[in-house]
Image: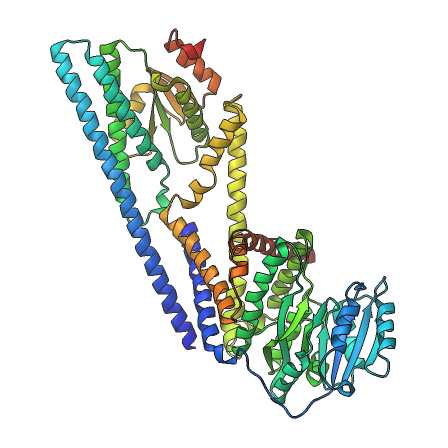
Amino acid sequence: MFYPLFMFFVLFVGVYMVAWFLLAALSGMGKLHEKIVWNRQPTVSILVPARNEEKHVTKSLGSLAGLDYPKDKLELIVIDNGSTDRTLALAKEFKKRFLGRLKVKTLTVPAAGKGNALNEGIRHASGEIIGVLDADTFVTTDCLERMVPYFKDASVGAVTNYVKPIRAKGVLASLQSIEYVFSSFSKKILSTLDSLYIVPGTLSLVRKRVLKKIGFSSDTLTEDMDMALCILKSGYRIENNMDAVAYTSVPADFAGLLKQRVRWYRGFIENVAKHSDVLFNRKYPHLGSFVLPFSSFLAIFVGVALTFVLLSNILDATLLAVRRSFYIPFAGTLDLVAISLRTFSLAKLFVSPYSAITYVLILLSSLLAVVAAFRLQRIRLRSNLLMLPLYFFVYYTMIMIFWAVSIAAELVKLRKRW
Amino acid sequence: MNIYVKAFLITVLVFIFGLFVGLNIERFMLSNLEKRSSSVESSIRDIELELLYFQGLGEKDSCTFLKEVVRKTNNMLDVMADQLGSYNENDILFTSGQIADVKATYTSLLIKDWILQDRIKKECNSTVVSVLFFYSTKDCDDCVVQGDVLTLLKDMFKDRLMVFPLDVDVDSDMIGILMSKFGVKSTPSLVVNGRLYSGIMQKDRLKSIICSELPGAPECA
């Protein structure tokens, strides 16, 4: 009796989150393409922490040089975070090339976490506003002019932008581009409800006054989420502009994706644990009472539950196949395969009308959320139409398994501590 | 905060719709089962009627007619068994009582079919092997494997092997009677032409037992 009740509850939470997302998206429609105007242009220092990024650093620095912002109010600080390749050399070449046109500083910091590198950079920064750009990301020319004006409002502590993956070939790249259409959109929606909990290193801007008070920390795997939560807890707001676009490089193979996601999801768990005082706290209306708790719940339970169901099905089928081989020798591989397929797969999932309905509901709600993200941003679905089934049936499942792996990794870490 | 109330209402509506769809699917599946059950019932009444008629006449020609009806009935019972076998009690919300009734009816029909076939075997001197297969759906992986063994052998022997799968957990007096008559104490158990074999049986061993009851069968060469 426990199992169906539990699935019922998980399904309820899942459908609820989609309904909430759609309502939040509709209510934030007016702000999607807002353009703030400010007659002031404060000084901006952009920190570029880099560790062995010789492949990308010149391109990202080049994109910064192309920014449409008064050059006398702009400063770039490249922080070599213990690189063993030509990163520093390339940065120095860039500095020399733009000597007299653009202020560039290069620093070297021994490899001890991104947080430390950034804090060192802050110490050398002279701008009123500090930006963080990872060396594998490049920006479009109008980024700063669209993002800076938000600081006109004194309560704004940070501004983020819209992230897209750098166009690459391959199935994994197309799947990720669908994913980013949805996640970048939801960041905008979250910001309209003061619930944006990440300031990613894709040229996010933070007020120096705020940064000096907080400082980056290296105690979690994702210092960008840590920083965002600290900013919100200091009473500042985080805004997002959807027209300021940054392109980031995404993993091209499965191993790279696994590594990246396990770091992200472990970081999410670590940060929710570190900032657990936000949960169900009235001071953070949407973030504390809904976004964080329910996202965590879904991530943990759906990820774990789905992986568990998949694994137990596979285990059952394997054990059954082994037993069969004892009692049905020489049945021929075709016979065995046919019989095994009959008892495994569909029979287990769709035997009951409710299993089928649950599966269909989960799929439909997720599909609805993603399609809404596309349509509300007026992005054409047609080119991605073929990818969508692959996205829902394969990619989603893979992500859920990554969540299960991340949770397991965090639990292992906890046991080591005791 | 209005978003939260609206989202809740939407979710509740979606759930009500889902339950409504589920209820209708359940009803549809149940009515299919009940229809099939009635067909089997009338088929078995046909067998009983024919037996009665031909017994009265003392004719031996009856056997061809009887064998045909029996084959038809067995096919229907097989289909019913497949449909019933795939039900999981935990997942049926509205019609579980009625499904249990259909299962009990199916069991009675199956046993009736077995009794009638026994009588036809004697009347027509046919060499057909009847296997009563006692199984359980609770914690019996061996039962699943035994079922597969039987399926393979059925494909091999076709009409000469009749399998009667009996779920020991179904609420039926007759199953209890049969179990005590043949001394069935565990699952899986097989009663092949009246002889009990407890525990799971390997394919080749079962095949040789069947062959000993079917002298001269081409599959046993």
Tell whether A264 sits left or right of B74.
right
Can residue A13 be spotted in the picture? yes
Q: Look at the picture and state if B85 lies above or below B120.
A: below
Q: Which residue is located at x 39 percent, y 73 percent?
A: B5
Can residue A14 be spotted in the picture? no
Q: Position of residue A78 (x, y in %)?
A: 80, 74
Q: Position of residue B109 (x, y in %)?
A: 24, 28
Q: Look at the picture and state if B26 lies above or below A206.
A: above
What residue occupies the far top of the structure in this picture? B216
Q: Position of residue B204 (x, y in %)?
A: 48, 17
Which quadrant holds residue A209? bottom right
Q: Which residue is located at x 44 percent, y 58 percent?
A: A364
Q: Look at the picture and state if A412 lies above or below A274.
A: above
Quadrant where the C terminus of chain B is found in the figure: top left
Tell whether B86 sits left or right of A158.
left
Which quadrant holds residue A270? bottom right
Q: Which residue is located at x 29 percent, y 20 percent?
A: B181
